C-alpha cells in the first residue's frame, strides 16, 4: 500500500520512513504534500465560522503541510499528538512552560544540553520554579530527590557531550508513582534507535535540526506526547502562538525519507572511528555508549537499537594548564572537519567541549574533551584528518 495512512507498524523502519505522513491520494496522487503558505482560512458561512466546524481554522493551528509532518512523527514515536516548534531548544522550553507552574519543583539531569540549563536557571527560576540537577546514573534512587511539589523529571540520554546513559524505565516508574510528568530529549538516538514512550516517558523531545534535517540548514523541533499529556501541550502551543513555516516542515518530512539509511552510515563510521581512537596512545578515553568499555554500555544495549554518529574522546594531557593548548592544536590541524556547532548533517564537525556548568556529572580530569560529529564522508578520509589532529596535539 502506497497510502501512508495504512502503513503497518510492524513493517521495517525504512519502509515506514518512506511512507509515513501524507496520503498521496489526498492531493491528486502527488507523492509529496503541498507546501501551504497560510494565515487566513475561509469559512463557507457565518455558522461554520462561529462553530469552527472545519478541519483548518487558522495558519498558526496547522496546515496540510504541518499535519503531514506531525502524522509522520506520531507514527514513529507512538504518540497521541505532536507539536512543531521553531528550534530544538523551543522543543524543550515549550513543554516546560506547559507542565510547570510557580511553586513547582523540577528535576533536570545534570548532563543536560546547556541551553536547557540556561532556560531553567533564568526564566524558569524567575517564574518561581525550583530547579534541581541530578546524577544521570541515579536510576531508581531518584526517589530520594522527589518532593511533594515535584512536577517534572527531565531526562536526556545519552547526555550532551559526555554521553552518560540513564535508566529511563526506572526513573519513569518512580516519577509516575509521585505524579510527575517525564520528559526526554531524545535527539541523539532519534525514534529510529530509541522510542521514549515505549520506555515510560510521557513527552518525547527532538531537535529535528539534527538528523531529521540532515543537511545543516533547517532549524525545527518536535514535541510528542502520550494521550494523558497531549491536551496541556497543544494548549501551550496555541496560547504561546508558537508555529513553524511550511517550507521548513516540508524539508524535515523530506529528510525523514532518508534518515534511516543516513543513520546507518553515521553509526557505522562513528563506531569504527571510536574503536580505532580507543587504541591510540594519545587518547585517555572514548565516550561512546556503543563501546563495551563505556560505563553506561549495558543500558544502551538493553534499551537502544542503534547508535548515531556523534561521540567524544578525552585527549591525554599532562596537566590542566595544557588542556586548552592541546585541544586547540588538535582542532586547528583538521581540514576535513569543520569547527562548528550542531550536528546530524552530512559533514563532519569537531569542537572542544566546555563542561564548567556541571554540578554532578563533572568533567573528565585526564585531558580536554573533544566532540566529533562523524559525517557521511568516506571513513578513511575522516580517519586521516583525525590522525593529523592527533599528531598536532602530540607536538604541543
Ligand atoms: C542541538 C540540540 C538541541 C537544540 O536544537 P536547536 O534546533 O539547535 O535549537 C536540543 N537538545 C539537544 C540534545 C541538542 O543536541
Image: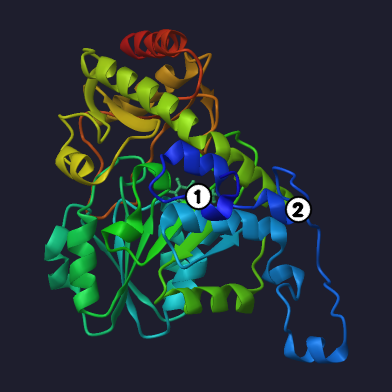
- The residue sitting at 38% across, 36% down in the picture is 353
Tag of residue 220: none
Q: Is residue 373 above or below residue 332?
A: below
User: Which quarter of the picture shows residue 319?
Assistant: top left
Residue 259 appears at what percent x and percent y?
51, 36
Apparent side of residue 136 relative to residue 33 in the rendered image (left or right): left
Residue 73 appears at what percent x and percent y?
51, 54
What is the secondary structure assignment of the residue under circle 1?
loop
Crowding around mark 2 (Cα neighbors within 10 Å: few <14, some 14 to 19, many 20+) is: few
What is the secondary structure assignment of the residue under circle 2?
helix
Circle 1 is placed at which residue position?
7
- The residue sitting at 21% across, 59% down in the picture is 169
Tag of residue 27: 2
Q: Is residue 378 above or below residue 71?
A: above
The answer to whether any part of residue 124 appears in the image is yes
Q: Is residue 204 above or below residue 47?
A: above
Amino acid at each position: 500500500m502506497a497510502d501512508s495512512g495504512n502503513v503497518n507498524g510492524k513493517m521495517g523502519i525504512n519502509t515506514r520512513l518512506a511512507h509515513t505522513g501524507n496520503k498521496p491520494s489526498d492531493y491528486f496522487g502527488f507523492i509529496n504534500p503541498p507546501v501551504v503558505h497560510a494565515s487566513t482560512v475561509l469559512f463557507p458561512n457565518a455558522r461554520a465560522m462561529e462553530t469552527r466546524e472545519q478541519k483548518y481554522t487558522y495558519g498558526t493551528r496547522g496546515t496540510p503541510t504541518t499535519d503531514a509532518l506531525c502524522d509522520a512523527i506520531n507514527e514513529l514515536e507512538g504518540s497521541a499528538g505532536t507539536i512543531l516548534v521553531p528550534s530544538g531548544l523551543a522543543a524543550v522550553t515549550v513543554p516546560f512552560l506547559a507542565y510547570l507552574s510557580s511553586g513547582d519543583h523540577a528535576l533536570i539531569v545534570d548532563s543536560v544540553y546547556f541551553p536547557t540549563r540556561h532556560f531553567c536557571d533564568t526564566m524558569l527560576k524567575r517564574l518561581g520554579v525550583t530547579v534541581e540537577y541530578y546524577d544521570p546514573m541515579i536510576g531508581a534512587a531518584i526517589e530520594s530527590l522527589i518532593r511533594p511539589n515535584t512536577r517534572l523529571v527531565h531526562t536526556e540520554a545519552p547526555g550532551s557531550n559526555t554521553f552518560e546513559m540513564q535508566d529511563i524505565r526506572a526513573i519513569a516508574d518512580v516519577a509516575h508513582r509521585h505524579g510527575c510528568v517525564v520528559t526526554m530529549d531524545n535527539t541523539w538516538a532519534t525514534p529510529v534507535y530509541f522510542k521514549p514512550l515505549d520506555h515510560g516517558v510521557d513527552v518525547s523531545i527532538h531537535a529535528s535540526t539534527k538528523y531529521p534535517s540532515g543537511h545543516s540548514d533547517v532549524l525545527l523541533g518536535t514535541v510528542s506526547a502520550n494521550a494523558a499529556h497531549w491536551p496541556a501541550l497543544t494548549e501551550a502551543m496555541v496560547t504561546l502562538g508558537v508555529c513553524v513555516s511550511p517550507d521548513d516542515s516540508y524539508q524535515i518530512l523530506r529528510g525523514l525519507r532518508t534518515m534511516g539509511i543516513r543513520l546507518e552510515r553515521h553509526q557505522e563510521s562513528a563506531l569504527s572511528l571510536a574503536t580505532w581512537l580507543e587504541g591510540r596512545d594519545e587518547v585517555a578515553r572514548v565516550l561512546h555508549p556503543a563501546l563495551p568499555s563505556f560505563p553506561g554500555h549495558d543500558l544502551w544495549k538493553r534499551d537502544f537499537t542503534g547508535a548515531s554518529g556523534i561521540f567524544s574522546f578525552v585527549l591525554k594531557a599532562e596537566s590542566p594548564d595544557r588542556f586548552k593548548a592541546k585541544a586547540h592544536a588538535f582542532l586547528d590541524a583538521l581540514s576535513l572537519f569543520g569547527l562548528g556547532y550542531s550536528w546530524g548533517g552530512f559533514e563532519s564537525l569537531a569542537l572542544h567541549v566546555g563542561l564548567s556548568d556541571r554540578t554532578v556529572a563533572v568533567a573528565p580530569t585526564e585531558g580536554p574533551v573533544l566532540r566529533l560529529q562523524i559525517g557521511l564522508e568516506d571513513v578513511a578520509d575522516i580517519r586521516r584528518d583525525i590522525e593529523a589532529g592527533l599528531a598536532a596535539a602530540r607536538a604541543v
